[in-house]
């Protein structure tokens, strides 16, 4: 008798920092929303609040899935907890410059130019499709988190001079990460990539 295929639990999630490979490659659409995904979203909100963030993408907790969460109030007792699964952005309009930071690049904050308004279509955690026309901070956070699903960070959107400035900080992050890997505190890239492949195989279709 064969046992049913069980999706592995996702375990204890942790925030990962640049240049963890999960942050640098395109996430894959979720083909199903199982208990483990519900558990992951719950953990992601805890992690985000603890870090004082207003948005968090699955790739930032080393999950290669097209999923991110937002609460612009950054507190569990205020604002609205939004979950975006397999989001699609369209109709970018206007543009605005605002300072951004990222939980995967702690300490770095820079001005980023983005469309002022966008339309997002996504699925909720209960599998309901929804669509919203966003502006202001919500439009900005959604675009920042969507970039994470594309393997992009806000530092990829800087004008030349600012990009050069950010580069020094990114070099430092790379040295710190390599140091952790050489001391065995973080698995080597090949191992991290193999884990991402396993997670994709469990919950993503053949896209
Ligand atoms: Ni970020």
Image (tube, rainbow, N blue to C red):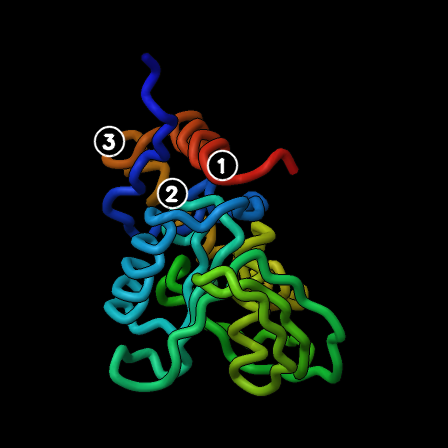
Please say if 186 is above or below 41: above
Residue holding disc 2 = 175
Number of other residues with Cα within 10 Å of mark 2, as a class: few under 14, some 14 to 19, many 20 or more? few
Residue drawn at x 74%, y 84% as measured from the top left: 94
Residue closer to the observer: 58 or 179: 58
The answer, for residue 20, to whether it is visible in the render is yes
Which of the 4 image quadrants contains residue 87?
Answer: bottom right
Please say if 52 is above or below 84: below
CA gap between label 2 and label 3 equals: 12 Å
| Rendered image: mark on residue 145 | none
Q: x and y percent of residue 132 in the render?
A: 61, 78
Q: x and y percent of residue 106 in the render?
A: 36, 63
Tell whether label 1 touches label 2 (CB within 8 Å): no
Residue holding disc 3 = 183
Badge 3 marks a residue whose secondary structure is loop
- Mark 3 or mark 1: name the one nearer the start of the chain: 3
Q: Quadrant of the N terminus?
A: top left
């Amino acid at each position: 008798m064969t046992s049913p295929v069980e999706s592995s639990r996702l375990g204890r999630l942790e925030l990962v920092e640049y240049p963890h490979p999960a942050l640098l490659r395109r996430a894959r659409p979720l083909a199903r929303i199982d208990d483990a995904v519900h558990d992951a979203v719950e953990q992601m909100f805890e992690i985000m609040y603890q870090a004082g963030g207003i948005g968090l993408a699955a790739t930032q907790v080393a999950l290669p899935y097209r999923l991110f969460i937002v609460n612009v109030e950054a507190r569990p007792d205020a604002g609205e907890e939004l979950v975006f699964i397999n989001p699609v952005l369209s109709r970018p309009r206007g543009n605005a410059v605002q300072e951004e930071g990222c939980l995967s690049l702690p300490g770095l904050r820079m001005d980023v130019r983005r469309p002022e308004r966008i339309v997002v279509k996504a699925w909720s955690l209960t599998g309901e499709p929804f669509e919203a026309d966003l502006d202001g901070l919500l439009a900005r956070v959604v675009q920042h988190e969507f970039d994470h699903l594309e393997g992009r960070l806000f530092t990829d959107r800087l004008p030349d001079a600012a990009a050069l400035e950010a580069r020094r900080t990114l070099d430092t992050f790379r040295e710190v990460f390599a140091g952790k890997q050489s001391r065995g505190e973080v698995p080597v890239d090949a191992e991290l990539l193999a884990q991402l492949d396993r997670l994709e195989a469990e919950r993503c279709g053949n896209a």
